[in-house]
């Protein structure tokens, strides 16, 4: 089996699986959607447009797994449990055709654990394909190929993802949380802790969200609003996974557990938007006259209050300039977003071979206006390094590489070239 990918099997018809199936069907692919029961598989058709339903066939793992023999790409999207995934992949390996690509949509289980002791054929054809939710909306697709996957197979998968599914593919490595969630979750988990003294000093959560939004090129959900969207239950699982798998000494280690107030919210089921009336850090209720009431859960008092306007006087309007503002808001931005930039600049080549994949992951997966290295170019790498040195903070690896190179920015020639780990510039493909 070789050439273009024209048929897709999705194993698991939950939210993510249904989204992948619906997207592939909308692009004209023949899709086989399987789950434990026929009912579960048919429920997964809800994300497929009526005009595309003819492209999808449903079935079960027990009755229809043999149909994988004629499928080009098989993507597993079941529960995040290594033993269950491996058990299913063993069954898949017994029936799939030669040359078919097999992938897992896991966001936290290492590929090396999934593929351990599996047959050589499986090792050649397996990868992680980490979609972001909602699948039809989010552009990012992180691809982690197996160590034995040939370059032409990686290219075949990437070509299909980009040119058929319309995804922005980034090449990630087999490290915890890959690229987007490694950096994005550091920003959120560290942010909850670092924000505490600012809250205690009187800064509102609305102001924190606003500062960590447009002024630094992040969507207006900011910090708390984004966690309400994701859910504290999900963030808790992310934190636990990071705690178990982060390299020793990683800058995120101190932040993997929630602060006391957020842990109390989690314990009582106050998770975010999914909690409806319970809310999260904020909630919206409809009044009798049809208007809406916006409330904020004050983390200092741990009580609900009316939402207030953020205090942004003195915050510079130019992108990124808030990092250097001599205000409480500027210090907040430096300690949270600035720390995220430092963290990003220390993760090459650990999580990706180059800065381009990291920048694209944050733009396509988290909606950042510019990636971390693009932002460093916006504010000036030398200026950033000078502040680090003035505060006796270590200079991250890629900033040190830039400082010792002949260049003055991470990108040059209109963004057509980027600085590599070797200190030389390379074309952006």
Image (cartoon, grey):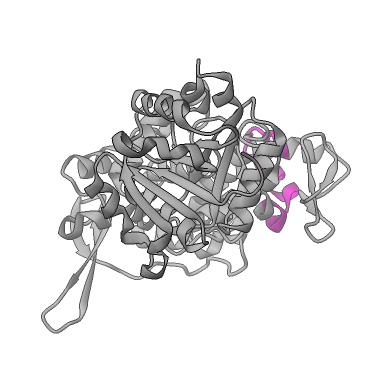
Q: Which residue appears farthest toward the top when viewing the image?
A: 117
Residue nearer the viewer, 261 or 275: 275
Q: Is residue 14 shown left or right of residue 301?
A: right
In the image, the segment drawn in magenta is: 376-398
Q: Is residue 406 shown left or right of residue 225?
A: right
Residue at 47% over, 22% down: 113
- Please tell me whether residue 380 belongs to the stretch shown in magenta: yes
Location of residue 262 by image quarter? top left
- Please tell me whether residue 23 belongs to the stretch shown in magenta: no
Q: Which SS type dominates the magenta stretch?
A: helix
Q: Position of residue 414 (x, y in %)?
A: 81, 61
Residue at 56% over, 44% down: 142
Give above or below for 241 relative to 155: above
Residue at 34% over, 44% down: 34
Q: Which residue appears farthest toward the bottom when viewing the image?
A: 289
- Residue 382 visible at all: yes
Q: Is residue 12 shown left or right of residue 317?
A: left
Residue nearer the viewer, 18 or 5: 5
């Amino acid at each position: 089996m070789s050439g273009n990918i024209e048929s897709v099997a999705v194993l698991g018809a939950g939210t993510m699986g249904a989204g992948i199936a619906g997207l592939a069907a909308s692009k004209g692919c023949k899709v086989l959607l399987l789950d434990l029961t026929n009912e579960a598989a048919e429920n997964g058709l809800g994300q497929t447009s009526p005009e595309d339903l003819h492209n999808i066939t449903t079935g079960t793992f027990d009755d229809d797994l043999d149909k994988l023999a004629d499928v080009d790409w098989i993507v597993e999207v079941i529960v995040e449990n290594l033993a269950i995934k491996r058990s299913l992949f063993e069954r898949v390996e017994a029936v799939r055709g030669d040359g078919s690509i097999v992938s897992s949509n896991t966001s936290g289980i290492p590929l090396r654990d999934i593929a351990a002791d599996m047959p050589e054929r499986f090792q050649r054809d397996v990868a992680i394909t980490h979609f972001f939710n909602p699948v039809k909306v989010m552009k990012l697709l992180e691809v982690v190929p197996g160590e034995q996957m040939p370059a032409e197979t990686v290219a075949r998968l990437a070509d299909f993802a980009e040119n058929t599914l319309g995804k922005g593919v980034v090449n990630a490595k087999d490290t915890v949380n890959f690229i987007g969630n490694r950096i994005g979750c550091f920003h959120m988990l560290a942010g909850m802790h670092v924000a505490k003294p600012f809250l205690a000093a009187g800064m509102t959560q609305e102001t924190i969200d606003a500062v960590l939004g447009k002024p630094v090129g992040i969507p207006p959900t900011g910090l708390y609003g984004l966690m309400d969207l994701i859910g504290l239950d999900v963030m808790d699982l992310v934190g636990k996974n990071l705690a178990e798998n982060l390299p020793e000494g990683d800058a995120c280690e101190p932040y993997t557990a929630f602060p006391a107030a957020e842990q109390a919210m989690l314990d009582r089921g106050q998770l975010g938007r999914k909690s409806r009336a319970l809310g999260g850090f904020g909630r919206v209720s409809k009044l009798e006259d049809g208007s809406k009431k916006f409330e904020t859960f004050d983390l200092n008092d741990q009580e609900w209050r009316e939402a207030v306007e953020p205090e942004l006087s003195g915050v510079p309007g130019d992108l990124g300039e808030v990092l250097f503002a001599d205000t409480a808001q500027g210090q907040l931005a430096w300690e949270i977003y600035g720390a995220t930039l430092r963290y990003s600049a220390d993760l090459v080549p650990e999580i990706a071979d180059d800065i381009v994949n990291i920048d694209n992951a944050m733009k396509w997966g988290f909606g950042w206006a510019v990636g971390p290295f693009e932002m460093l170019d916006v504010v000036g790498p030398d200026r950033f390094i000078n502040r680090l040195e003035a505060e006796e903070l270590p200079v991250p690896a890629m900033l040190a590489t830039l400082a010792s190179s002949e260049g003055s920015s991470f990108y040059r020639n209109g963004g057509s070239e980027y600085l590599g780990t070797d200190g030389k510039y390379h074309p952006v493909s």
